[in-house]
Image (cartoon, rainbow, N blue to C red):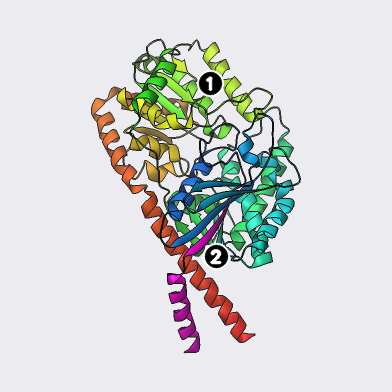
Amino acid sequence: MGAFTMKACTKNIFRDKRLFILHIALQGCLRAHDVQYGLTADTGGHIRYVLELAAATGARPEVTRVEIATRSFREPGFDPIHAQPRERLDGNCDIIRFASNRTGYVAKEQLGAESRSYSAALVRYLRRLPVLPDIVHAHYADAGQIALWLKQELGLPFVFTAHSLGRLKQVSGAGKACKAVRNDVITDALRRRIQTEEAVLAGASLVIASSRDEAEQQLGLYANHDSRRTCVIAPGSSLDDTAPAPALARIDGILRALLHKPDKPPILALARPVRRKNLATLLQAYAADSQLRERANLVLFTGSRQSRNRESSENAAVRQELHGLIERCGLHGHVALPASHAPGDVSAIYRWAARRRGVFANVAYSEPFGLTLIEAARCGLPLVATNRGGPCNIVGEHGSGVLVDPHDEAAIGNALCRLLANRDLWSQCATAAMQSAAHFDWHRHTATYLQQLRTLLERERAVSWRRRSTA
């Protein structure tokens, strides 16, 4: 009876308490505004997810404070903001930055060596706070490792979002080594990452997946996956789909300078230039199909390009491969590969394509979720998407396009041709795409998210009380 009463009392305490949530996200160039997606190989969609989740959660009355802990660095060619200790994101949400042993930018593959020194700096900061966070939310395996140490050091429960999993790369072929890099080095790095992911999955109080496919198929590849501690919450999208006229005019001007017939329907892809995104196969599928080339242009936005001496080897190699394919296949004027685009131009890019009855393509070797698919759908673009990962739910369950094998060039070309040639099918998928976007809403996401956090904290508190009472 006493235990039951204590548990009920704990529930009431946590229902009334406003939460303090600490996110840890170390990969890429994370900043509050004007993120330059594609600037590095690890500055991608997970940063948008973290920023939008933090802002949407912080705006709710149940939350008193949100902080995003990331790594500070100083590096020529990068904005000095990345060395600023604190940056306001929105309302009661801040980005906080801590140094590790190395002072410069560190790519995701080398972050493991910085974990101990970074963790020590973060623990020192937390010990100085008058109130510790109620919960830690770790993004990617490297942050999960630090969350494990925080749990051991300070007793903080943590939530884990994987974003991208090593075992998925292993089985999909997306983790194949660059010819310029030794296969054994890549294999060792992938092995260490998988070992870390197994440890993080074992220690996490809750694992948040973005789709059923991620929860059941992708996480199911791990020995320490526990479906009872896994919750599926589809991310939202805060993209403003009302593109302003100046942005539309700017995008139109850029593409008119690169395309012979810029008013033809475009096949649009918007992705970082990394091998997992499989942009070369999309280009080869376009090059191999004369009807597709006659009917449409191919437009590839690959993020912000750095100077050659600063760009990662993978980014540079993928861009070089794409330019080489355009040259060899004689596709100048048929394929546009803009050097960069501003973060604020994203909705204009989608709108530009939708007005020309284009199609959005994401044929990645594997896609844990597929945020760009939601953004494109919101703007009325039918989708051709990989059948490996989250798109199986995003596209397959809503009828917003066609799923394809990312290794099958002919299947990719045929799917694109079907949507572009059949006006009724295009209209049907475009309508379904816009309707499906309503399912991916941050208000809905954060309501479920906070409910899950409160349930977790109630359970952790009850377990802690039972341990003390039997000691």
Rendered-image quadrant of the C terminus = bottom right
In the rendered view, tell whether residue 436 sits above or below residue 153. above
Nearer the observer, 76 or 409: 76
Q: CA distance from mark 1 to mark 2?
A: 43 Å
Q: Nearer the viewer, residue 337 or 102?
A: 102
Task: Give the quadrant of residue 77.
Answer: top right
Of circles 1 and 2, the one toward us is: 2
Magenta includes 11? yes
Q: Give me the residue at 52% from left, 30% from top.
A: 278
Label for residue 358? none
**Pick the front one: 425 or 83:** 83
Task: State the residue at coordinates (60%, 40%).
Answer: 28
Residue denoted by label 2: 134
**Where does the magenta region start and end?**
1-27
Q: Secondary structure at mark 2?
A: loop
- Residues under numbered marks 1 and 2 in contact, where contact means CB atoms less than 8 Å apart: no
